Image (spheres, rainbow, N blue to C red):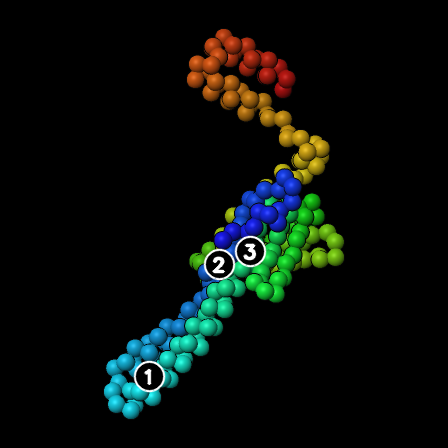
């Protein structure tokens, strides 16, 4: 389940909605392997020894399952969200914990990865923002380089909206010429009309 859209601000849109990297669950999965192996071993035993070992294996499995389920629920309830207005971090089902960083307060974004994390495509982001919060570290981020790039793009887009009073920036001359060429190719405008409008746009440069 994604981040609830009812919690967004008016006009706010979600750019990225991420849960922690699967490595977040790795320790619990690793512990489960010998627990399950011990349970399989217990099934091969007979007599009183098999009964005692079987009960022990069952108790261990239930304890591990509860431990793993709690971690899984924590993973499911953790969101790192990038919107057109802010960065949102939420975790917890009952006891909630969250942070919001408006994009216009983001000053710098540092990404760090160990060699092992590079193999797993995981890493951490350190976000510096204006205000009391200062630096905030977010761990177990999937594809941190991509996320860092998307945050920078969102910050730049937000800055443009603020400087232009919420109005989108005018398209560049090359992009307008490319759109005209597409209209010409589709037969919407003639070659003569395309050349005339192209010359007009080039004169503005």
How far from the left and from the top, in percent, is residue 105?
A: 70, 48
The residue that label 3 is drawn on is: 79
Q: Is residue 155 left or right of residue 59?
A: right
Position of 109 with respect to 46 (left or right) is: right
Residues 108 and 182: in front is 182
Q: CA distance from mark 3 to mark 1?
A: 39 Å
In the picture of the structure, the residue carrying the numbered disc 1 is 54
Percent x, y of residue 201: 59, 16
Question: In the rendered view, would you say 190 is above or below 18?
Answer: above
Q: Nearer the viewer, residue 149 or 54?
A: 54
Do labels 3 and 1 touch, CB within 8 Å? no
Q: Is residue 115 visible?
A: no
Q: Quadrant of residue 200?
A: top right
How many residues crowd mark 3 within 10 Å: few (<14), some (14–19), many (20+)? many
Percent coordinates x, y for residue 31 in the rendering? 42, 74
Checking the image for residue 21, the label placed there is 2
Foreground label between 1 and 2: 1
Q: Which mark is residue 74?
A: none
Residue 71 vertical placement versus 141 (above, below)? below
Residue occupying the far right of the picture: 132
């Amino acid at each position: 389940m994604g981040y609830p859209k009812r919690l967004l601000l008016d006009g706010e849109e979600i750019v990225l909605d991420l849960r922690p990297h699967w490595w977040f669950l790795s320790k619990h999965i690793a512990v489960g392997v010998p627990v399950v192996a011990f349970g399989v071993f217990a099934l091969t035993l007979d007599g009183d020894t098999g009964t005692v070992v079987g009960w022990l294996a069952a108790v261990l499995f239930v304890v591990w399952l509860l431990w793993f389920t709690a971690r899984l629920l924590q993973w499911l309830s953790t969101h790192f969200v990038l919107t057109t207005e802010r960065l949102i971090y939420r975790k917890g089902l009952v006891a909630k914990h969250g942070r919001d960083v408006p994009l216009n307060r983001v000053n710098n974004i540092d990404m760090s990865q160990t060699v092992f994390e590079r193999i797993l495509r995981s890493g951490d982001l350190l976000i510096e923002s204006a205000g009391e919060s200062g630096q905030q570290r977010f761990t177990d981020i999937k594809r941190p380089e991509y996320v860092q790039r998307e945050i920078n793009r969102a910050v730049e887009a937000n800055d443009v909206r603020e400087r232009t009073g919420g109005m989108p920036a005018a398209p560049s001359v090359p992009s307008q010429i490319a759109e005209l060429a597409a209209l010409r190719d589709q037969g919407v405008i003639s070659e003569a009309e395309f050349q005339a409008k192209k010359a007009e746009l080039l004169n503005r440069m």
